[in-house]
Image (cartoon, rainbow, N blue to C red):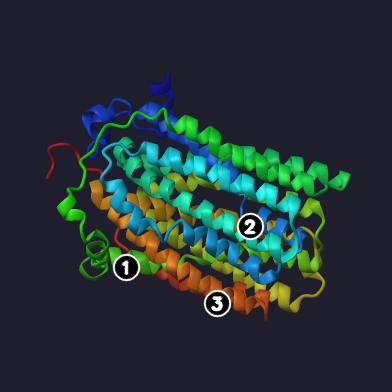
Amino acid sequence: MIKKLYRYLTKDNDDEQVCTEISEEACRYVPRNFFLTIFSQIFTKLGDTLSNPKTVLTWLMSYVSAPVYLISFIVPIRESGAMVPQVLFAKYINKRAVRKWIWVLGSLLQFLAIASIGFIVLNFEGHTAGWLIIVALVFFSLSRSLSSLSSKAITGKTIPKTQRGKLKGYSVSASGVLVLVAGLYILYQSHHHPTLSFYSDIIFFAAATWLVAAVIYSRIKEFPSDVVPEDEEENSAVSHLSLLKTDQHFRNFIIARTLLLCSALSAPFYVILAQRYVGKEAYLLGLFVIAKGVASIVSSPIWGKYADKSSKNVMSTAILIASGLGIATFFIARYTDSVRSYHWIYPAAFFILGIAHQGVRLGRKTYVIDMATGNERINYVSISNTLIGIILLLVGSLSALVSLLSVEGVVLFLSLLGLLGAYKSYKLPNVEKRVKKGEE
C-alpha cells in the first residue's frame, strides 16, 4: 500500500529508470524513506513556523520590549548560524558512512534551544530577554547546521533525483495544514486577550516538534556510503573553497543564491510595518501565521513539481514575485496614508511573500542536490551555505542599520537585489536530467 501511494504521489512507475543515482538496495526502500522523510519534515517545518523569527519571534521580542536592532538581527543570526559552520561540519559528516544519526542529534539539540526561548520570555524582558534569545538562537542555528547538511546527503542517497522536489513540496504543503490550524487557534484566542504564557506555550509546543521528528527520522533505512579518506580531508576546507575558482557553474549558483536573500530578509519588516501602522493585537499574529500556512498549502506541491523539471526557473520566478511585492509595498507604505493602515494588507502581502519564499527555498535546495553527486554534494552544500551565511550576516547588518532610518527603505533595497537575482537564476544551466541505466 505504501508503494502504491508513493507511485500515485510521484506519478512515476518506472523504478529502474528513476533509480539511476542511488544504490539498488536503497531503491527497494525508497517508498518507506520517502514517507518517513516527509513526516519528519512536516514536524520540523511546523516547529519552524511556530518559532519563526520572521513572525512569531519578531512578535514575541516586541512583546517583551526587546530593542528593534536586536529584532532586525534574529533572521540573519538564525539563518547564518546554521550555514557558516557547515564547511567545518562537512569534514566530520564525510567520515560517517551512516549519517542519519547526525540529523537526529541536531534535531534533539534544536528541541532544547527552542524550549529555552520559552523559559526566557517567561522570566526576562527588555535588553536582557533580547540578548538571551539571541544566544539561544545561536545554539539553535549551530544544531540546525548539523541536520541541514546531513539531510542533503541522506536525501541524495535515499530519494531518486526526479522525486526530491515533490518530496519537499508535499512535506511543506502538509505542514502548512497544521500551521493553518495553529494560526486559526491563535486567531481564536486573540478574543480572550492572551497573556505572555500563551505565547510561551506556542514556543514550547514548537520545541516538541523537533523531538517527534527525531524519533521518526531515526527509522529511515540508510545504507552505508563511501567515506572520504583521512589524507583527502586534511585540507578539506581550503580545497572545498577552491571550488569557487575552478567550478564556474557552482560560482554562478552562489552569486544567484546571494541575490535571492530578499525573500527571507524582508519578511520581518512586513510584521514591523503591520505593528507600526495597524497595532500589536494578537489577531494580527494569527493572521500572519495563517497566511504562511495557506501559502505553503497552495504553493509547495506546485513549486515542487516545477522544481523537478527546472529548479532554476522556480528560483527566478519566485524571486520576481517577491521583488514585485516589495516594490509595491514600499510605495503603499510610504505614499498612501489611508491604505497602509488597513488591517488586512500586511497579512495579504505576507501570504504572497510566503508563496514566493517557498519557491525560492524549494528551487535552490533541489538545484544544489541535483547539481552534484555523492560526497561532492556535501562539499557543494557546505561551501555554499557557509558563504551565504557570512553574506547573510553582512546584508542583515546593513538592513538593521537602514531599518533605523526607514523600514520601507529596507524592503525596497532587498527587492531590487531580488530583481538581479531573478536574472542570475534564469541564466543558470538546468541540472534536472534523467539518465537511463547503461546510457553514457
**Picture coordinates of residue 39, whole percent (x, y):** 50, 33
Residue 223 lies in quadrant? top left
Q: In this view, does 110 lie above or below 414?
A: above
Closer to the chain start, of discs 1 and 3, is: 1
Quarter-of-image position of residue 97: top left
Of residue 377 and residue 105, the one placed in the foreground of this image is: 105
Q: Residue at x 87, y 48 (%)?
A: 193
**Label 2 CA crowd tier, 10 Å (few <14, some 14–19, many 20+):** many
Quarter of the figure that contains the C terminus: top left
Looking at the image, is mark 2 or mark 1 nearer the viewer? 2
**Residue 97: in sight, yes or no?**
yes
Residue for badge 1: 252
State the residue position of label 2.
133
Q: Name the residue under label 3.
A: 398
Q: Mark 2 falls on what kind of element? A: helix
Coordinates of residue 271 in the picture (x, y in percent): 69, 62
